[in-house]
Amino acid sequence: MKKFKRKGKVVVSRLDSYEVELLESLVQQLVEMVSEGEPQNFTTQPESDDPFEMWARDLQADPDEPEASEDPVLQRLFPNAYPHDPDAASDFRRFTEHDLKVRKISEAQLVLQRLQDTDRGAHDVRIPLDEADQWLRTLTSVRLAVATRLGITDAESADELAELPEDDPRAFMVSVYDWLGFAQETLVTAL
């Protein structure tokens, strides 16, 4: 991957075919995880413009007391807003979690579309400036997911993992974690 560079009203970078495939895979896994395998349940298009119909749909679809996920990655992506107040935490999830998931999935799908536009790395990835924030949030979510699975909680634990021998099965994912950080940093710098 080459550094992101700004060219007019777009930010561009060259990704090799394997980098496109890797990033597509990671972003698709994010979509699957966030949507619990059912991304069609998290569409951004409301079925009606009538707010009462939308509220009725939301009340039918969302449980009265949604449970916090047991998955550490989802806990990191959607942290508990009120760790010392279970009732407030449940209410917060009930009123915000669906919309947060819709946004995260929609942004990830935008990233997937831009990656598909590269024709497997044959063309530069081109990110319009008005989509840069969506890219940054998606890269951050993917990097947080990788960090959580690796057990990275701070700079010290990241440094310890960076010293792994190449034959350690975690070493590849540590390199992916670093690569995602490089992508984030150069994208921010290009803006």
Image (cartoon, helix red, strand yellow):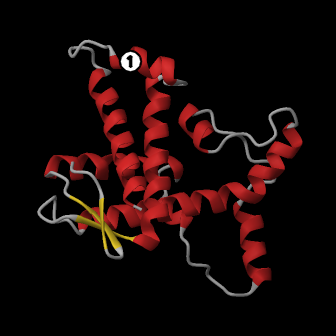
- Residue 56 appears left or right of 76: right
**Residue at position x 32%, y 21% in the image:** 170
Quadrant that contains the C terminus = bottom left
- Where is residue 97? Give x, y as percent: 68, 54
**Residue placed most toward the observer, 118 or 132:** 132
Above or below: residue 129 compared with residue 150: below
Above or below: residue 117 compared with residue 1: below
Secondary structure under tag 1 reads helix
- Where is residue 151? Give x, y as percent: 49, 22
- Residue 40 appears left or right of 47: left
- Where is residue 43? Give x, y as percent: 53, 70
| Amino acid type, mark 1 | Leu
- Where is residue 146? Give x, y as percent: 42, 34
**Residue at position x 35%, y 50% in the image:** 186
**Residue at position x 37%, y 62% in the image:** 111
Marker count (numbered): 1
**Residue placed most toward the observer, 127 or 168:** 127
- Residue 7 appears left or right of 89: left
How packed is label 1: few (under 14 Cα within 10 Å), some, or many (20 or more)? some
Above or below: residue 75 compared with residue 58: above
Check the image and name the residue furthest to the bottom.
49
Q: Quadrant of residue 135?
A: bottom left
For label 1, the residue is: 161
**Residue at position x 26%, y 27% in the image:** 172
